[in-house]
Amino acid sequence: QVTLKESGPVLVKPTETLTLTCTVSGFSLSNTRMAVSWIRQPPGKALEWLAHIYSNDGKFYSTSLKSRLTISGDTSKSQVVLTMTNMDPVDTATYYCARMVRGVRSYYFDYWGQGILVTVSS
Amino acid sequence: DIQMTQSPSSLSASVGDRVIITCRASQSVSSYLNWYQQKPGKAPKLLIYAASSLQSGVPSRFSGSGSGTDFTLTISTLQPEDFATYYCQQSYSTLMYTFGQGTKLEIK
């Protein structure tokens, strides 16, 4: 049974750094056909892909947020960590981690965590 | 970045209706197009991947078609549990995956 679960602070202050952890089970982070992604959704708005990491440590970031994001993985702990610097109230959103499958004709997110609502406010 | 545009943004329909949602990419994404369903307060759920492949466990009333820049999601016979928001997503550009703005399907 594949599961992903996000953890981290629910409230951060402007200019602070956000650190979120995704703990996975039911699959291995060393699986070369899969990656773990972070995706966020501001209240009432659309989904926005942020970053993902592959088993070979390949990392990809949103072009608009690249300067603020760092993603890392710990295979032994089955965890993927996302840090986002210089948080602003516009970064208030539900942050999801999701498993990405590298299929033959598409890459897709087949399992998602429940999400964690992060509010940025002083 | 590849922009994804869905239409309509919202849609009212009745149980039993046939519903079509379209998604257009700003440049070709080949078959690298996926569809998700999201209900309030829940994480998105994968419905269709690679434009037309039905994810395991998803009812067969959902189908997808298209390639290149134009795609459709069809719900053949709308059920009460299908009222939700639907998103398309391209994974052709590995530099930047993008989602559509969403289509909210409401009960008429």
Image (cartoon, rainbow, N blue to C red):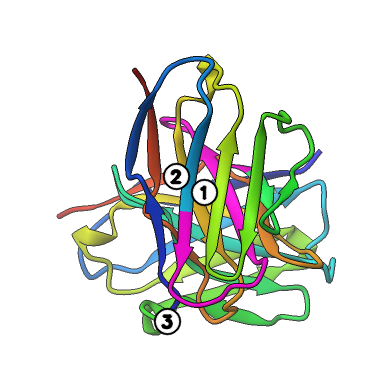
Tell me which amino acid carries mark 3. Thr
Q: Nearer the viewer, mark 3 or mark 2?
A: 3
Q: Residue at x 74, y 59 (%)?
A: A77
- Image coords of residue A22 (percent x, y): 60, 55
Mark 3 vs 2, N-terminal side: 3
Kindly identify which numbered label has been placed on residue A63.
Answer: 3
Mark 3 vs 1, N-terminal side: 1
- Image coords of residue A8 (percent x, y): 46, 51
Q: What is the span of residues highlighted in magenta in the rendered image?
A: B23-46
Is A94 situated left or right of A58 in this image? left
Q: CA distance from mark 3 to mark 1?
A: 25 Å
Magenta includes B27? yes
Is A91 situated left or right of A76 in this image? left
Query: Which residue is labeled 2 in the image?
Result: A116
- Image coords of residue B91 (percent x, y): 60, 69
Magenta includes A89? no
Which quadrant of the figure has residue B10?
A: top left
Query: Which residue is labeled 1 in the image?
Result: A7
Q: Residues within 10 Å of mark 1 (few under 14, many from 20)?
A: some
Q: Residue at x 67, y 29 (%)?
A: B61
Q: Residue at x 32, y 45 (%)?
A: B9
Tell me which amino acid carries mark 1. Ser
